[in-house]
Image (cartoon, helix red, strand yellow):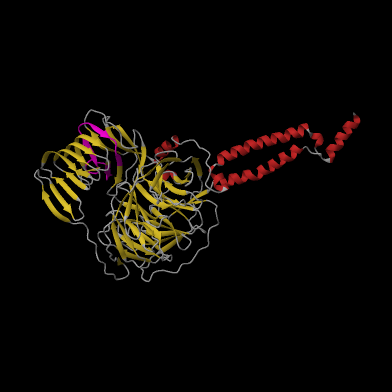
């Protein structure tokens, strides 16, 4: 008779033989990327289409495309000439795809069959960016360049424009049925009442980039130049921040609710990340293109997988196969628009050039939670219509702010007042003012001459090419040297606000912004780097953004950018030093992708056991390494027990007939 422990050991061994392959199989979801026909297409926004396909915009190739989740075949449509730089995209209530033209200042729609209709916007609408379908059936979109929110119906008629502040983008519909968007320059997330246009502002710690409704009833948002992601409770206004794992250089761009109950966000030069809305636990996925840009746009596809764009000169569409369901069948849609222009299309049976994937996990750190908001009501409520490329509309134009008065102060400063209440003050190049000037809120001060002292308060901006003996930029204010770009000189600089640096080439003052400091320098505010004039920095180039001509060292650093910090801006990795030049300049050094990735790897945190929000498969995926280790140790122990039992209790084991005969003869002989 067999020993009872033998039965137990064999049952455990059988279970392990079954479980281990399941764990290994489930632990690593397949990540595959499919290249577009044009390597410089720069795909941007990506959405779940009405026809069962995944649609995306191509910013540089002037195309709209989709990928079939079943066949993984890519189809692209050429856009009409002049409809350039397609950027934001959404699925409309009419079952068509609607997208923005950030450079052409147009809103367009494309049917699932590829027919395109273009609607021109009034001249006051500059840089329409993100777009979403509202619960009212209309299209809501951000107007980044002229600080507005536009509303258009699915017939192409412009219904409304609301004036906002601070560079709106990242628009979505919140769980509360209102419109939510980011104001990047104002560092706040904004809720707009869909019926009245009244807004509530939620100040955040960094410039926000995208918003998305979460399964927990909160509004989630990402922040540029930050190592955090946040959420806002629409009912209470409470804001909670969570740390992004591993490195401050992982910058979250877009965010979406995943099919697994987690929030998914794209990470520059890494791939994708997830966060559990309930526990704050995070996980990262390194994509095949992590070394060349990682992921940008991200969406849950109709097949319950995560789809993303690789927005760089490698231009790919990627998918994280979660294995939650089989891809859906294609669904036909009806509405195609009564007026449209024809477009050319081409299909490619793209095979994924790389399908390897790896995952890492860490615990999510829940930061401080706060509640801070201000409410106000927007003024603009008039309606206007836009022109379409394929139908005759009679648009009524909206009036941009105009100069209502110009005056000269007793000290020679020129002050202009606009119709919207903002003011612009100028110290001309040939003027010297030996006075202290406090720049009021919402005023832009140009100093092209000499000013003895300028104090910029919250909401104020200082620009110009002149000299300010003592320059103080308080929190909430900003400094933007030159006239885009240029240099400004100061003998005593205190920077607690935002220093906006534009890079348009390699020559200081001519191509990129610089502060020439001849005396003490105290830093503590934010640094925002942007690219202009089509310039793309190359590895090895460096930019002296503060030229410290004094012999003293700099006091303090920019916020969250201590000496040697590596950060990403506009898809370009930089390292900042406060010891550049002669040893005391602030210099941005452009890094290669390899150097950047090496720095990221060296700063990775240790993995920790993370429990998923729901489901055994997500749990196994998150903790595969730990689970496999436990199972392997258990397997070794079980095998040891079996061998021990066989050795010490062989008399109770039923042996094969041949073995029993041999032993019987042996006993008889004895």
Q: Quadrant of residue 334?
A: bottom left
Query: What is the span of residues highlighted in magenta in the rendered image?
Result: 499-527
- Residue 115, compared with residue 360, is above or below; it is below
Q: Looking at the rendering, which quadrant does residue 448 occupy?
A: top left
The residue located at (68%, 36%) in the rendering is: 638
Query: Closer to the camera, 592 or 115?
Result: 115
Q: Position of residue 665 (x, y in %)?
A: 89, 34
Q: Is residue 37 visible?
A: no
Task: Name the residue rendered at 23%, 28% in the picture.
Answer: 551
Asked which quadrant contains residue 478, the reply is top left
Residue 470 among those drawn in magenta:
no
Relative depth, front residue between 191 and 120: 191
Vertical position of residue 337 compared to residue 146: above or below: below
Question: In the displayed structure, does residue 578 sit left or right of residue 214?
Answer: left
State the image coordinates of residue 392 (x, y, percent, origin top left). 29, 71
Left or right of residue 375, residue 447 in this image: left
| Residue 665 seen from this side | yes
Q: Residue furthest left?
A: 410
Quadrant for the N terminus in the image:
top right
Foreground of the two, 502 or 533: 502
Viewer-side residue, 317 vs 447 = 447
Q: Residue furthest front?
A: 236
Residue 657, percent across and down?
A: 84, 40
Residue extending farthest to the right is: 668
Determine if the magenta segment contains residue 510. Answer: yes
Q: Quarter of the image containing the C terminus? A: top right
Residue 170 placement (x, y as % from top left): 36, 52
Q: Count up the numbered dots.
A: 0
């Amino acid at each position: 008779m067999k020993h009872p422990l033998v039965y137990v050991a064999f049952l455990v061994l059988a279970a392990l033989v079954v479980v281990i392959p399941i764990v290994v199989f489930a632990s690593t979801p397949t990540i595959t990327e499919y290249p577009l026909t044009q390597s410089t297409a720069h795909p941007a926004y990506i959405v779940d289409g009405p026809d069962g396909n995944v649609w995306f915009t191509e910013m540089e190739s002037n195309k709209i495309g989709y990928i079939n989740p079943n066949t993984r075949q890519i189809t692209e449509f050429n856009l009409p000439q002049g409809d350039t730089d397609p950027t934001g995209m959404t699925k409309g209530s009419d079952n068509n795809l609607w997208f923005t033209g950030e450079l052409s200042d147009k809103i367009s729609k494309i049917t699932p069959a590829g027919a395109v209709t273009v609607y021109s916007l009034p001249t006051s609408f500059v840089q329409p960016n993100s777009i979403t379908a509202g619960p009212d059936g209309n299209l809501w979109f951000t107007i980044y360049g002229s600080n507005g929110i536009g509303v258009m119906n699915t017939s192409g008629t412009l219904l409304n424009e609301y004036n906002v502040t601070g560079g709106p983008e990242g628009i979505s519909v919140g769980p509360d049925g209102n419109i939510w968007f980011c104001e990047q320059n104002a560092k706040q997330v904004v809720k707009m009442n869909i019926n009245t246009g009244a807004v509530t502002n939620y100040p955040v710690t960094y410039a926000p980039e995208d918003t998305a409704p979460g399964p927990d009833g909160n509004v989630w948002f990402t922040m540029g130049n930050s190592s955090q992601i946040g959420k806002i409770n629409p009912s209470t206004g409470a804001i909670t921040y969570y740390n992004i794992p591993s490195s401050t250089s992982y910058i979250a761009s877009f965010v979406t609710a995943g099919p697994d109950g987690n929030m998914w966000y794209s990470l520059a030069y890494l791939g994708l990340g997830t966060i559990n809305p309930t526990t704050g636990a995070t996980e990262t996925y390194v994509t095949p293109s992590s070394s060349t840009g990682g992921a940008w746009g991200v969406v849950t596809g109709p097949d319950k997988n995560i789809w993303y764009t690789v927005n760089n000169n490698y231009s790919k569409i990627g998918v994280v196969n979660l294995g939650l369901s089989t891809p859906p069948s294609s669904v036909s849609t009806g509405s195609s628009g009564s007026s449209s222009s024809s477009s050319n299309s081409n299909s490619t049976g793209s095979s994924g050039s790389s399908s390897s994937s790896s995952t890492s996990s860490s615990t999510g750190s829940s930061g401080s939670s706060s509640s801070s908001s201000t409410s106000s009501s927007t003024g603009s409520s008039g309606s206007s219509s836009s022109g379409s490329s394929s139908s005759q509309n009679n648009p009524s134009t909206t009036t941009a702010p105009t100069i209502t008065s110009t005056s000269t102060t007793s000290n020679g400063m020129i002050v202009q007042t606009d119709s919207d209440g903002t003011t612009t003050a100028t110290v001309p190049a040939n003027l010297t003012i030996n006075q202290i000037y406090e720049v009021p809120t919402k005023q832009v001060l140009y100093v092209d001459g000499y000013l003895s002292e300028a104090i910029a308060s919250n909401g104020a901006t200082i620009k110009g090419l002149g000299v300010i003996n003592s320059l103080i930029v308080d929190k909430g204010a900003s400094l933007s040297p030159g006239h885009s770009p240029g240099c400004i000189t100061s003998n005593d600089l205190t920077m607690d606000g935002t220093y906006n640096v534009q890079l348009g080439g390699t020559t200081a003052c001519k191509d990129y912004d610089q502060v020439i400091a001849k005396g003490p320098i105290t830093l503590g505010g934010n640094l925002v780097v942007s690219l202009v004039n089509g310039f793309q920095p190359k590895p090895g180039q460096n930019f002296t953004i503060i030229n410290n001509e004094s012999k003293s060292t700099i006091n303090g650093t920019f916020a969250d950018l201590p000496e040697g910090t590596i950060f990403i801006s506009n898809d370009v990795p930089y390292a900042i030093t406060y010891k550049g030049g002669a040893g005391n300049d602030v210099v941005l050094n452009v890094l290669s992708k390899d150097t950047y990735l090496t720095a990221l790897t060296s700063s990775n945190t240790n993995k920790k056991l993370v429990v998923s929000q729901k489901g055994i498969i997500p749990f196994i995926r998150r903790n595969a390494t730990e689970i496999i280790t436990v199972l392997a140790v258990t397997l070794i122990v079980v095998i040891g027990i079996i061998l021990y039992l066989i050795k010490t209790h062989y008399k109770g084991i039923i042996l094969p007939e041949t073995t029993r005969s041999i032993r019987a003869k042996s006993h008889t002989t004895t």
